[in-house]
Image (tube, coloured by chain):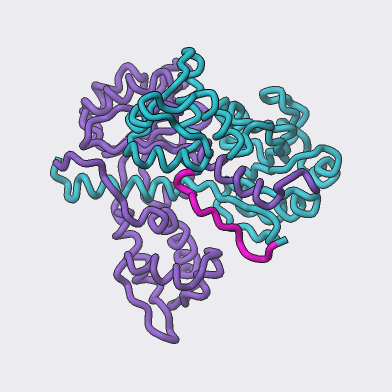
Chain colours: A purple, B cyan
Amino acid sequence: MKRRALKIDKLPTVRRLPAYLTILRELFLKEEQFVSSSYLAERMEIEPILVRKDLELTRINGTPRIGYCIEDLIKGIEDFLGFGETLDAFLVGVGQIGTSILYNRELTNLGLNIVAAFDKEPEKIKALIQEVPVFDISRLAELSKKIRAGLAILCVPPEDAQEVTDILVMSGIKGIWNFTSANLVVPEDVVAQKEDLASGLAVLSVKLNRIQPAHND
Amino acid sequence: MKRRALKIDKLPTVRRLPAYLTILRELFLKEEQFVSSSYLAERMEIEPILVRKDLELTRINGTPRIGYCIEDLIKGIEDFLGFGETLDAFLVGVGQIGTSILYNRELTNLGLNIVAAFDKEPEKIKALIQEVPVFDISRLAELSKKIRAGLAILCVPPEDAQEVTDILVMSGIKGIWNFTSANLVVPEDVVAQKEDLASGLAVLSVKLNRIQPAHND
């Protein structure tokens, strides 16, 4: 195991790949066979040169005047992202955010498969939400040894986040998708990624300030 | 008004600023006065040199061996992000995601102030959620002229997203925070930012594949 933090060189490209996938699957359903980088550029609202650079990551080559084979490109992106196979996951904390993730079809389409959910509220336990069983969080350690999952989606209150993370890590979970505001401490061979609405608001706020530097509407 | 798309040069830094703010406010509440870049680096899990580069954006300088003045840094980040003043917003679509945003205290702490919510479900209308009134979506055009907001948070089904966007743009909204899977068409002087869980899953999936290239657990 490497001791250095994982580095992703092409992060902005990786972030854009699911959007390409959505557009390509839509074209595939319309029985289109080829797509040009300029069409993709227009739909993605980026420059064609950037589209070509993004798609280099998939190692699928376009043909001049014909474009990219849509089926190959879908397969190439899925392979790169590891979305070809499903990604089995636990969801811990069935509150507003947790529930919205259980209902999110876009994530399911990308291969996310939530196999079990956990909560501490008695009225939520034993229910099926979108066919996912909800267990008492006290059973997390026991069940996470029995039910196989590579990923845990963390939607608990921030004050419980580290304790739950420790249990998950002990039971062999290698990836934690952190929807709490807590900064988690995990071993170096575990990936913890924070999904951070505050970051989105920060970017938006800076962009808004640039178009309206003063209150001059 | 410029015709070119807005470009943010320091996007990764901007995305990190709210996390700095959370840490700094926590220290401020503990009555700490100064903080070192190495402490911030450890909490942020990035290199100290990157912390110093990030904080250059605020134009607050640290003092060798003493560090940064916490109060100045908080003010500097707030000013840069425009978080000093509140950002008034509409929320359209009070489903799972919309509701979770209404309850998100982290966003409130960063200055987001939701002044009105809209939905088409009769049972949701006239309710107050977290003290925010919920109106019938048919009143969006009328009320968005009366109630001032710079931002709209879009949480409607994707098939309704463009229609709602058009109404919002016509009534003078300059920023749209898009939580739907739709790609929106907006005029060049309007900022539309997509908040995309699929992007987060893509990055996480690639990171996970790097630590476990095969199923060798």
Write down the quadrant of residue A112 in the picture.
top left
Q: Position of residue B145 (x, y in %)?
A: 84, 44
Magenta stretch, main secondary structure, is: loop
The residue drawn where x is 69% and y is 55% is B190
Magenta segment: B2-13
The residue lying furthest to the top in this view is B31
The residue drawn where x is 21% and y is 25% is A170
Write down the quadrant of residue B156 in the picture.
top right
In magenta segment, residue A57: no
For residue B70, side relative to residue A211 (left or right): left
The residue drawn where x is 38% and y is 34% is A153
Image quadrant occupied by the N terminus of chain B: bottom right
Q: Nearer the viewer, residue A60 or B163?
A: A60
For residue A11, side relative to residue A170 (left or right): right
The residue lying furthest to the bottom in this view is A65
In magenta segment, residue B8: yes
Image quadrant occupied by the C terminus of chain B: top left
Total numbered circles: 0
The residue drawn where x is 42% and y is 29% is B63
- Residue B17 vs A32, above or below: the answer is above
Q: Position of residue B15 (x, y in %)?
A: 48, 42
Asked whether residue A117 appears in the rendered view, the answer is no
Q: Position of residue A1 (x, y in %)?
A: 14, 41
Asked whether residue B27 appears in the rendered view, the answer is yes
Q: Position of residue A162 (x, y in %)?
A: 34, 22
